[in-house]
């Protein structure tokens, strides 16, 4: 039996609609695989393009749309390929610029010294450890020196926010060649976000 989509349905199939949907999905998947195979043959850096879109699609709707298209159809147009290549080069340049800035970082103060700091949040993350959830905050000062605080408590701060507080210099560390000043026991914390400054109560951050 033939269907309206030119899919022949064998006799005895009870759910013709389900059969057609499955057949159409197989056809679409085979077409996508064929298109991606041709895409790989056409562009030597095809895998580089795909990997970049996969890793960066969350950065913008534009990159997300290109990743979705490549995943769904298996190919990009020549113009889209050039746009992705341009984004890759811009990203490499920006990473190199940031690495050069980070390389200027120097250890600050002496171990055990209590200091008053005014820093900007550069990065934050968290992960489960054997002691529970560990949060990491990476800051920089106006001279691009890097400071790191690790603790279990949450602080309501976003990238680019300003934070003023007192802390103890716990350690002088280094990560991937970048010197870091490790902090402990932050107190008297004030966070400035979007021009508004608010205090953080004692105990909302701890070592």
Image (tube, rainbow, N blue to C red):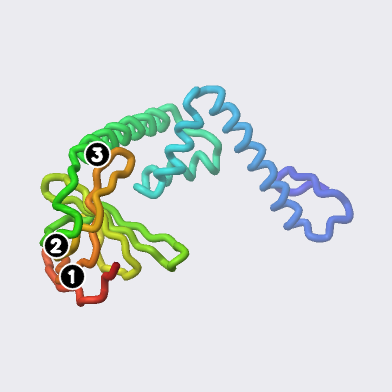
Residue 92 or residue 72, whichever sits in front: 92
Distance in Å between CA atoms under marks 2 and 3: 29 Å
**Residue count near mark 2 (Cα–Cα under 10 Å), binned few <14, some 14–19, many ≥20:** some
Vertical position of residue 199 compared to residue 182: above or below: below
* Mark drawn on residue 114: 2
| Residue tagged 1 | 187
Horizontal placement of 17 versus 38: left or right? right
Q: Which residue is mark 3?
A: 98
Q: Position of residue 136 (x, y in %)?
A: 32, 59
* Label of residue 33 in the image: none
Q: In the rendered view, would you say 46 is above or below 11?
A: above
Label 3 vs label 1: CA separation? Answer: 30 Å
From the top left corner, tell me how far across and down residue 73 is, in percent: 55, 39
Label 3: few (<14), some (14–19) or many (≥20) C-alpha neighbours in 10 Å: few
Residue at 29 percent of width and 44 percent of height: 174
Look at discs 1 and 2 and give the one toward the viewer. 2
Q: Quadrant of residue 144?
A: top left
**At numbered mark 3, what does the secondary structure look like: helix, strand or loop?**
helix
**Residue 107, image x, y percentages:** 19, 46
- Which tag, 1 or 2, sits closer to the chain's start? 2
Give the alpha-carbon distance from disc 1 to disc 2, as whole Å: 11 Å
| Quadrant for the C terminus in the image | bottom left
Mark 1 crowd level (few <14, some 14–19, many ≥20, 10 Å Cα):
some
């Amino acid at each position: 039996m033939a269907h309206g989509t030119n899919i022949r349905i064998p006799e005895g199939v009870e759910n013709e609609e389900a059969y057609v949907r499955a057949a159409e999905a197989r056809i679409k998947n085979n077409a996508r695989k064929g298109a991606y195979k041709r895409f790989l043959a056409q562009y030597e850096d095809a895998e580089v393009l795909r990997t970049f879109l996969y890793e960066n699609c969350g950065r913008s709707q534009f990159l997300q749309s290109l990743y979705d298209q490549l995943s769904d159809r298996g190919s990009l147009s020549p113009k889209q390929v050039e746009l992705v290549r341009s984004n890759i080069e811009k990203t490499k340049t920006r990473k190199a610029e940031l690495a050069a800035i980070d390389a200027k970082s120097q250890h600050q103060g002496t171990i055990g010294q209590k200091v008053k700091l005014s820093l900007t949040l550069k990065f934050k993350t968290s992960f489960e450890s054997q002691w529970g959830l560990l949060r990491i905050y990476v800051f920089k000062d106006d001279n691009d020196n890097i400071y790191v605080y690790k603790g279990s408590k949450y602080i309501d701060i976003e990238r680019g926010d300003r934070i003023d507080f007192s802390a103890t210099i716990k350690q002088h560390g280094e990560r991937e060649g970048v010197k870091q000043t490790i902090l402990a026991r932050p107190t008297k914390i004030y966070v400035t976000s979007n021009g508004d400054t608010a205090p953080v109560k004692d105990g909302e951050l701890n070592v």
